[in-house]
Image (tube, helix red, strand yellow):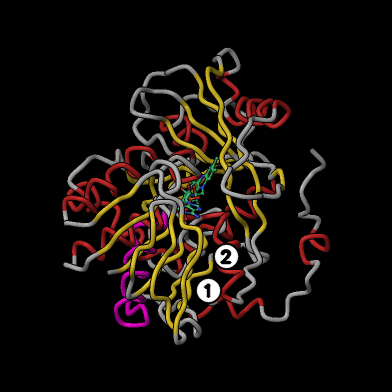
Amino acid sequence: MIVVVGGGVTGLSTAFWLARGGHAVTVVEKGIVGWEASGRNGGGCSHAYSPLFREEQRLWPMMDELLGHPTEWRPNRIRIALDAGQLERLAAGSRIAADQGFRIERLDHAQLREFVPWVGDDVAGAFFWHCGGHANPQRTSQAYAWAVERHGGRVMQHTAARAICVRGGRAVAVETSAGEIGCDAVVVAAGPHGAALMAPLGHRVPIAPARVEMIVTEPLPAIAHGGVDGNGLYGRQTLRGNLAYGGGPHEWLDIDGEATPRAVNTPVVASLARRLTELFSRLGHVRVIRSWGGVVENTPDGRPILDRLADPSNVIFASMSSVGFGLSPATGRALAQIVLQGHCDFADLSQLRLSRFGNLPLDWRARMGWEALPA
Ligand SMILES: Cc1cc2nc3c(=O)[nH]c(=O)nc-3n(C[C@H](O)[C@H](O)[C@H](O)COP(=O)(O)OP(=O)(O)OC[C@H]3O[C@@H](n4cnc5c(N)ncnc54)[C@H](O)[C@@H]3O)c2cc1C
């Protein structure tokens, strides 16, 4: 039995790949599946910086069929720069995708306007990525959970993992609010709560929780490629036509116990709305109808941690550092392989080991200016 702690997209995708392969798996989720960052995010699936990018791009077009439920995945990404600095960063990111064999096209203003009629004249440049994409986070989270169950796995909601019980250098059980569950291996994919589960095992996981927020506008007529980024914002047009956008700044938090603070901070929402009307200057009249917050965890170098511990050797740890939704099909497949065979055979994940933070000073959050804001 493999126990997965955390019913976000990382844990659920891992459980899906394991269950699909015929392995006994139980997911324990302290709340309901996808209720934390996994169901609250921007839905972007375009992580060119990740060693899992190729697999992310290979898998997304198949996910609806693999999971047996719609994720609302849509291909391609349009990326817009409003000034020279943004254009430089955009070009650098586009080169990273192009260097991996993906087609990236520079758009002139007329072409951009054809794709995105909402932009004004203040555009410094734009790219069309013939890769990347976006999906509906809530539908995707639920689709993973149903697929786990269809393949014979178990998803226990409202069940919190309290501790990992170790005997003879191996995890033998997970102590939960519903009793002890015996295990052959444990995958910890508990988002910002993962560090607390790892500390009693003697592992310090440097992650700083932060709240990030999204706004949603009233619906607009659908455009052909609704995944459009720029001006520090990421987001998508939903199938109904609403624009759902997020994009910092991070509000650093401390997390105690099992609760996750999510209340929305009005200045951040106002900043999102302002930047959205700068990006789409023809949409100044469109109303924001909803907003919400979600909590992500961030590592010091901004990259995920995906690792099988040396001790206890059957504990696998995952923390996605703010980029976990889009990568989830690939992350789950990689983690399933790490559980079963000790390594991932389709991507080099050595740069994502926990040990890279071995020499990190204890006060790293203070040094980076990532300490929680006063309440
Ligand atoms: C507003 C916002 C926008 C974002 N935009 C994007 C985007 O466009 N693209 C992208 O790729 N990523 C995006 N992200 C990041 C992405 O959502 C996360 O990286 C991803 O969802 C992480 O998934 P996870 O399963 O690792 O963690 P989580 O979604 O945090 O799930 C962890 C789960 O573990 C559960 N849990 C915690 N402790 C315990 C315990 N002790 N016992 C049992 N269960 C426990 C929690 O309840 C939770 O459901 C965004 C995030 C937010 C908040």
Number of other residues with Cα within 10 Å of mark 1, as a class: few under 14, some 14 to 19, many 20 or more: some
84 relative position to 139: left or right: right
Give the camera-side residue of 10 and 46.
Answer: 10
Q: Is mark 1 within 8 Å of ligand 1?
A: no
Report helix, strand or loop for mark 1. helix
Disc nearer the start of the sequence (1/2): 2
Give the camera-side residue of 137 and 6.
Answer: 6
Q: Residue at x 49, y 56 (%)?
A: 190
Q: Residue at x 44, y 46 (%)?
A: 128
Q: Residue beneath label 1, please? A: 352
Q: Contact (CB < 8 A) between labels 1 and 2?
A: yes
Q: Residue beneath label 2, please? A: 303
Alpha carbons under labels 1 and 2: distance apart: 7 Å
Q: Where are the magenta residues, as a range?
A: 325-346
Amino acid type of the residue that numbered disc 2 sits on in the rendered structure: Arg
Q: Residue at x 67, y 57 (%)?
A: 208
